[in-house]
Amino acid sequence: MKKKIMVVDDEDSIRFLYEEELKDENYDVVSYPDAQSAIDDFEKQKPDLVLLDIAMPKMSGLDALRILKDMSPTTPIIMSTAYSHYKQDFSTWIADDYIVKSPDLTELKEKIKELLNKS
Amino acid sequence: MDKDKIVEEWKLLYELGTAISLTTELKKLFHVVLTAVTIGDGLGFNRAAIFLYNRPNNTIDGILGVAPDSIQEATIIWDTLKNLDIRGKMASWLINEINIEAQLNSNFNKIISQFRINIEKDTIFKNIYQKEAFIFNSNNLGSDDKIFKELNFEEFAFAPLISREQPIGAIVADNFYNKRPITQDDISTLFLFSNQSAIAIENLMGVETYKNMSKRLIEEQQNLIHQKHIFNLGRAVADITHEIKNALIGAIGFVERAKKLSDTNQQTYKYLEIVKKELDRVYNLTLDINRYSKGQNRSVKKQFDLEKLILDTVETLKTIDSKNQNIKFETSLSEFAKYLYGDPDQIKQVLINLTKNSMEAISNKKDGLIKISTYKEDKFIVISVEDNGGGIDVKFLPYVFKPFYSTKSHGTGLGLSIVREIVQEHNGVINLNNFVGKGAKFIIKIPNITEEEKDEKKDNGG
């Protein structure tokens, strides 16, 4: 069965790019422009992995991270942001991995594969 | 002194005092005071000078000397003044008619304004502590009063400037040209006048200090405003860069996808390649700006294997070069510089930026060579990157580390600025040895901190 990835990012073009690229990798992709709607839909969708942007208006990715980990501690979550300094931020420690946004998705795809193989 | 003379003296002092109190500028006040001492209708001396006590240095400094330069000049001035009859209007004459320029240019003033002597070593100036005026001449002059010999003071009046019980300096005056002997009356009038002058001088010095202070405060304030502007500008740049970068991630991603969908023989494919190349260029600029702007890039320092980092980086750089020409890489890595305390990601960035620079410098050469060395020197770990690319044109040297300055058509001009930022962040220094016609060598020195020292720093709360 296809693995399902939940993409949360407020940037339309980036979200759409992730969708397209990950579908090409043979994943099911559900995407959300804000953290709250992703949380609301989480139980229904039961994704195998979440790709979560940090800098978003209203609810930030860091808040969403805690809520999602409460809901399902075993679902791997990859944080994604343009700022590399979050890597050292303790509030991202409960995330499973971290990527700096880039037009080259090779690293992201590798990390997704790795985490899905583990779980 | 008879009664008439006393009245005359008081009238005179009153007029001179009025002139002094109406002067609002310290520099001008010195001219007014000394002119009053030297004009015939004033105190009538031939030459006069003001010296001030420089408390922090414990010296007596010559401030201003007023005198005609020759007996001829003196005669002309006296004749002119005789015809003027300024009695009764002396105050306004002193304030408005003094030729400050001429007074400043006199030879006498040139010597006086150079004068400086330690007060404790001087037999004349130690008398500023006395509360009376003196006549000095060959009878009571010490042998070490060289400056007075240089100025040909034979007999002169010395009046301390005392304000609020404190000596602030002295007025010295003589009759160099007409050799009129100095009388006790002259001395007592001069002393009264010098007391008036001292109070005025001290007041205006206070005003001057206050003016300077408020000027400095204003400058300081403007500085702060400027810094705030720069800070805001920096933040604005970071925000804008972030937006541009995000937009480009989508754009580049989709151009890449569009390329995959189109036939490589099609015009569309070529066009998309050009679009991709241009977008990449702007994207790389945003990355450089991010690296350059502080705060976005807090370094995480630790002890790491510098040797391994250099060897790995060289391998990566070789692959970049593979499509280029045969650049040879040489490494000379000392075992004493195997480990470095710093941020490995940042040091890698430094190596990449410097090496890329070297690669560009030798891009048109055949036997290109880049040599990376490490060694230990005193308390520093030294990393150097050297090439044989002909060196940097001397005219560009002042701009080498300036941001946004590039001699290349495609550079962002941030490469070396980032290098310098990172080196500074590591408390290190960067130097450039430029051999015009041969090559350039960048030398980086970073303090060698061992694990123990690092722990000590932590313990001390550093």
Image (tube, rainbow, N blue to C red):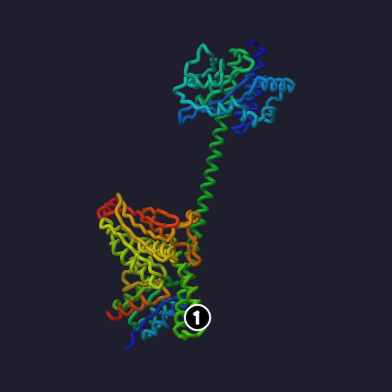
Residue B282 appears at what percent x and percent y?
A: 49, 70
Q: Residue at x 45, y 55 (%)?
A: B436
The one of B452 and A1 positioned closer to us in this rendering? B452
Q: Residue furthest front?
A: B366
| Residue identified by numbered label 1 | B270
Q: How far from the left and from the top, in percent, is residue B431?
A: 40, 53
**Residue B97 in the figure: left or right of residue B154:** right
Q: Chain of mark 1?
A: B
Work out whether residue B43 or residue A62 is closer to the camera in this orientation and state it: B43
Looking at the picture, how far across and down is residue A92, in whole percent? 34, 69
Q: Is residue B360 left or right of residue B343?
A: right
Q: In percent of the image, x 65 and y 26: which residue is there?
A: B18
Taking the image as drawn, is residue B244 in sight? Answer: yes
**Residue B14's image quarter?**
top right
Q: Is residue B5 above or below residue A77?
A: above
Q: Is residue B247 visible?
A: no
Q: Please rate how many residues cluster around mark 1, counting C-alpha atoms within 10 Å: few if below 14, some from 14 to 19, many from 20.
A: some
Q: Amino acid at mark 1?
A: Lys
Q: Quadrant of the N terminus of chain B?
A: top right
Q: In this view, which residue lies farthest toward the right?
A: B83
Quarter holding residue A31: bottom left
Percent position of residue B214, x then y: 54, 42
Which corner quadrant of the image does residue A57 belong to?
bottom left
**Looking at the picture, does residue A30 appear above or below residue B386?**
below
Q: Is residue A104 left or right of residue B404?
A: left
Q: Looking at the image, which is closer to me, A94 or A86?
A: A86
Question: Viewed as shown, does residue B412 lie left or right of B69?
Answer: left
Classify B364 as above or below B258.
above
Q: Secondary structure at mark 1?
A: helix
